[in-house]
Amino acid sequence: MLEPLYWVVRRDLTIAMRRRSDVFTTLIFFVIVVSLFPLGIGPEPATLRLIAPGIVWVGALLASMLALEQIFSADHRDGTLEQMLLTPQPVALLVSGKVLAHWLVSGVPLVIISPLLGLQYDLSIDALQVLVISLLLGTPTLSLIGAIGAALTLGLRSGGVLLALLVLPLYIPVLIFGAGAVEATVSGLGGQSHLSLLGAILVASLVLAPLATAAALRVAED
Amino acid sequence: MNHGTTAPILEIDALSCVRGDRVLFRDLSFEVRPAELLHLKGRNGSGKATLLRALAGLLLPESGEVRWGGSNIRRLREEYSRHLMYLGHLNGIKGDLTAAENLRIAATLDGFELSESRAWEVLGEIGLKGHEDLPSKHLSQGQKRRVALARLLANKARVWILDEPFTALDVAAVQLLQDVIRRHVESGGMAIITTHQAVPMIGEHTRTVSLGGTDA
């Protein structure tokens, strides 16, 4: 049952490892966007602490947006996507595999680098911890929701812009609870409730998003 | 696998397809039985590729239905895909993976295990000896087509739907592919193909369906 999932993940990771430059673009974009703000705003620790959660999270949002278009477009162009729809495996399962691989390649590096970026904003160790946990719970949701948008805009000429318009509004709840968790920790309230909600959103999209994506892919290949 | 009269047949019942506001074909009905090769003919743009996509279940027809063993393929979905091998204009191989990797992953997703050594054997058979572990993007157009066609050798699907399988192939490969298709049909499989070349290889088992008039 899970073997096709394993093979899809393995396939996409192999391809990602053979074209590493794509992986680093997302990561470097994230680092640059987040680092630009302290340079523009000035080195006032109190201000930086205040804006840090929002900026790191918005940076993560934009970076994961950037990588989204590639989830299905290459497979669509070379015909592997239509072959995927014709296998005896449930399409939602294969989609889950592709999203998981996409998250491992474009989401996990953001999570790993985030405490380093948080240091630029003078965040405490506690806040950094919560930042990492919130991104760990939030970025898979971004990939899952984004996959629906990527599937819906597949093969369109101005797909990239449309994808952003379609997906960014859907990212808002993740942004609110993700940045909220870190803010609550900074202000000493504790971010547990925000993290729980992030987890709940992740579970819901884990169940629903692959089904919606699979349906959208069938339409795209019609 | 069951053979003879009990084997399921593929029925096409009053199928109509519309692209944009142009009717490609209307009320098309025919059936394909085991050990039969169906050669689909028609001018460019007469809807051959569309019909094949509808038969594979990739495309939702305007009206009518495709039935496999009596049930609509829309309902069967994965159960039908298990018996199906579709090869369209696109090769469906990843340029960053080697020929052997492409073949093995396709096999796993098709629901069967293909060992590394068997994959190399199949690639040798289709004339890609020495190219098994080269990234597919470095292969020529014809060689990429061969990688895609190697799936036919490894697969046990009963229904083959092949859209212009002979394009980009050299004379030897065309000959080889004709043999492969003949063996498949003779052993009780079905094949539905479109090609602008004559199909001399099957003889009495070949049937022809023409789309969009008879001037093809």
Image: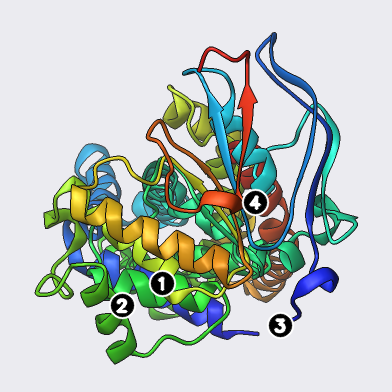
Circle 4 sits on which residue?
A: A213
Circle 3 sits on which residue?
A: B1
Spatial separation of the CA atoms under disc 2 and disc 1: 7 Å
Spatial separation of the CA atoms under disc 3 and disc 1: 17 Å
Circle 2 sits on which residue?
A: B122
Q: Amino acid at mark 4?
A: Thr
Q: Amino acid at mark 3?
A: Met
Q: Along the polypeptide, which appears first: circle 3 or circle 1? A: 3
Same chain check for tags 3 and 1: yes
| Direction from residue B183 to residue B101 in the image, left or right | left
Q: Secondary structure at mark 1?
A: helix
Mark 3 Cα shell of 10 Å, populated few (<14), some (14-19), many (≥20): few
Mark 1 Cα shell of 10 Å, populated few (<14), some (14-19), many (≥20): some
Select label 3 or label 2 by which is in front: 3
Mark 2 belongs to which subunit? Answer: B
Q: Which labelled disc corresponds to residue A109? A: none
Q: What residue sits 20% from the left and 60% below the top?
A: B136
Mark 3 belongs to which subunit? Answer: B
Residue B111 position within the rendered picture, expressed as x and y whole percent measured from the top left:
58, 79
Spatial separation of the CA atoms under disc 2 and disc 4: 34 Å
Spatial separation of the CA atoms under disc 3 and disc 2: 22 Å
Circle 1 sits on which residue?
A: B153
Mark 1 belongs to which subunit? Answer: B
Q: Nearer the viewer, residue A59 or A128?
A: A59
The reply to whether dot 2 and dot 1 touch (C-beta < 8 Å) is: yes
Residue A64 position within the rendered picture, expressed as x and y whole percent measured from the top left:
42, 52
